[in-house]
């Protein structure tokens, strides 16, 4: 801990979010401040429509994100490129060497939201992976098979055995983040491999199991990909996140969707958790008796994996309960359906960010 051993209050180094969807257009004005309120940096996912596949698109997207930042907040969006079968090596080389791309994201085609233009077969991007291994550019993976004959609850485990293990064998020095892990199998796989692989863990996968989606009716607010699994897996994720092992770090996968797209006969996958993500993680670490490990998970292991400096500021969480709003109106929304429902909507969370200190982060 940076300071303060009192369980009523903890001060930690300012965290980063190593996996977030900020979207584009008018949504940015609502969601960017929510992430930037707490996180100093964030790995920004490239699954826009159309996706970010060029250096110039990433630069202009980064500018739009920064234009949505309220004055007084320091926030660095770390951009990623969306891998495609025919993406050129030159895009990776230029984007990485110019410091525009921090990493590249692999979406198996049609695995999740806006992945239709993703990778159809990992072997088709072998030359890109070889380049990334050579230049030290991390590969971020949405780890689910897209084989419809595989049960949706097994798709992560099958991906690991069928694709990830062979990939690590082919590229032993490639730095890989298996994003938003959801299974005991993923936990064991990541911790038993060498330091080239790490995993992000979301707050929602630490709080809910698959029952949440079917509690008294179908609840699309708890539908995301990879889908939440059985309780046994949730418990394995909680042990991993609070283990103090550097291969597990914070990545919210906050994925906002306008209400009309969640409340639909074909509702979108994605849970919007950025407004209270840190408080949500704090609740888990508190319940597990591991508050002293929150700082490393949230603020140290991510930068260490990416080879980036630790943040220099600190923020304080206090044990003051707060009720999470049931919805957030979008600042420039067009109609009454333009709102977002956050994770934990209407629930009470035990921890709050100390707003006095948050608005005046201490060095
Ligand atoms: C994400 C989205 O909406 O962009 N959805 C989700 O369920 N997590 C995409 C992703 O990360 O899979
Ligand atoms: Zn995501």
Image (spheres, helix red, strand yellow):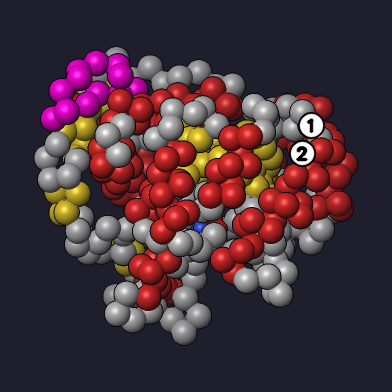
Q: Secondary structure at mark 1?
A: loop
Any magenta on residue 248?
Answer: no
Whether ligand 1 has any atom under 8 Å from the Cβ at mark 2 is answered as no
Distance (Cα) linking label 2 and label 1: 5 Å
Residue 59 in view: no
Image quadrant in which the C terminus is located: top left
Q: Could you say which disc has been placed on residue 24 in the image?
A: none
Give the quadrant of residue 271. bottom left
* Magenta region, residue range: 1-13
Identify the residue position indicated by label 1 in the image. Answer: 172
- Give the x, y percent position of residue 104: 68, 42
Whether residue 296 sits left or right of residue 199 in the image: it is: left
Report the residue at 14% width, 36% height from top. 319
Report the residue at 79% width, 43% height from top. 167
Give the quadrant of residue 226. bottom right
Q: Could you say which disc has been placed on residue 168 in the image?
A: 2
Q: Are marks 2 and 1 in contact (CB under 8 Å)?
A: yes
């Amino acid at each position: 801990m940076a300071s303060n051993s009192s369980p009523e209050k903890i001060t930690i180094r300012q965290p980063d979010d190593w996996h977030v969807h900020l979207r584009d257009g008018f949504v940015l004005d609502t969601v960017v401040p929510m992430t930037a309120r707490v996180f100093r940096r964030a790995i920004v996912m490239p699954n826009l429509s159309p996706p970010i596949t060029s250096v110039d698109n990433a630069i202009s997207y980064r500018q739009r994100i920064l234009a949505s930042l309220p004055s007084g907040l320091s926030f660095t969006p770390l951009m990623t490129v969306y891998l495609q079968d025919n993406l050129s090596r030159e895009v990776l080389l230029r984007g990485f060497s110019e410091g525009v791309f921090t990493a590249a994201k692999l979406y198996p085609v049609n695995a999740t939201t806006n992945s239709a233009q993703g990778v159809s077969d990992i072997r088709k991007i072998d030359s890109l992976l070889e380049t990334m291994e050579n230049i030290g550019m991390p590969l971020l993976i949405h780890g689910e098979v897209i084989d419809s004959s595989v049960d949706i609850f097994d798709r992560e485990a099958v991906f690991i055995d069928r694709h990830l293990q062979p990939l690590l064998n082919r590229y032993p020095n490639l730095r890989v983040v298996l994003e938003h892990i959801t299974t005991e199998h993923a936990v064991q796989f990541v911790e038993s491999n060498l330091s080239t692989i790490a995993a992000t863990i979301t707050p929602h996968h630490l709080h809910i199991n698959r029952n949440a989606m079917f509690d008294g009716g179908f609840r699309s607010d708890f539908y995301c990909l990879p889908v939440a699994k059985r309780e046994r897996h949730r418990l394995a994720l909680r042990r991993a996140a609070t283990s103090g092992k550097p291969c597990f770090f914070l990545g919210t996968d906050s994925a906002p969707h306008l209400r009309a797209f969640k409340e639909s006969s074909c509702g979108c996958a994605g849970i919007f958790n950025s407004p209270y993500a840190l408080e949500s993680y704090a609740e888990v670490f508190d319940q597990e008796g591991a508050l002293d490990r929150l700082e490393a998970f949230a603020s140290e292991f991510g930068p260490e994996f990416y080879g980036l400096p630790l943040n220099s500021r600190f923020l304080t969480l206090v044990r003051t309960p707060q009720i999470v709003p049931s919805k957030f109106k979008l600042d420039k929304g067009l109609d009454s359906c333009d709102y977002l429902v956050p994770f934990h909507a209407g629930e009470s969370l035990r921890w709050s960010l100390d707003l006095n200190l948050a608005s005046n982060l201490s060095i």
